[in-house]
Image (cartoon, grey):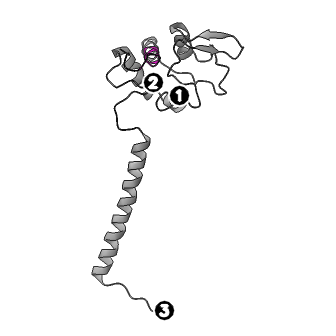
Amino acid sequence: MNRTAAPAPVAALRAVASSVIASGVAAALLVAVLAACGDGTSSTGGGIAAGSLSPAAERGRRIASESGCQACHGRAWEGGAGPALIGLAGSTVTLRDGTTVVADRDYLIRSIADPSVEVSGTWSMKMPPNQLTDEQVADVVAFVEALAEPAGSAG
């Protein structure tokens, strides 16, 4: 079969069509990725609207997000490879040795500052150590406590 090159205008149209199709696919992928990142509302997760957190809780939210905590605790803090942070503060936690503790401020501080001290018995993965300062830990605890409050009452 003897193939000849398409005339320049046809080749140009094919190039444009390929570009448009590729752009459409890229745009569709971008929309899908953005949709997976959230519903378009400004929220910290857990039903708490952005801007409704106390300054300490907002710093804690930012620290937890920037430290990669959502990789295990869930994009909206709903849990995943690690426990949910929503509703954690004030709940009863069963430790590996079978004892139970209330996830009060002191427990949360210990668990974040030194994750190997009191390990939850229901999770196979251990929380990795971190380099957070005492102030940063306190801010993260303020955020976790805010996630335990009914939606709209944080702050």
In the current view of this chain or complex, which residue is farthest to the bottom?
2
Residue at image mark 1: 73
Cβ atoms under marks 3 and 1 closer than 8 Å: no
**Left-right relation of 49 to 118:** left
Q: Secondary structure at mark 2?
A: helix
Q: Secondary structure at mark 1?
A: helix
Residue at image mark 2: 64
Q: Is residue 107 magenta?
A: no
Of the pair 39 and 122, the residue shown nearer to us: 39
Q: Where are the magenta residues, as a range?
A: 141-151
Q: Secondary structure at mark 3?
A: loop
- For badge 1, the amino acid type reads His
Q: Position of residue 35 (x, y in %)?
A: 40, 43
- For badge 3, the amino acid type reads Met
Tell me which corner region of the image, top left, top right, bottom left or bottom right, holds residue 59.
top left
Q: Nearer the viewer, mark 3 or mark 1?
A: 1
Q: Position of residue 143 (x, y in %)?
A: 43, 18
Residue at image mark 3: 1
- Distance of mark 1 from mark 2, alpha carbons? 10 Å
- Residue at (59%, 24%) from the top-left corner? 127
Residue 118's place in the image compared with 21, above or below, is above
In the current view of this chain or complex, which residue is farthest to the left?
9
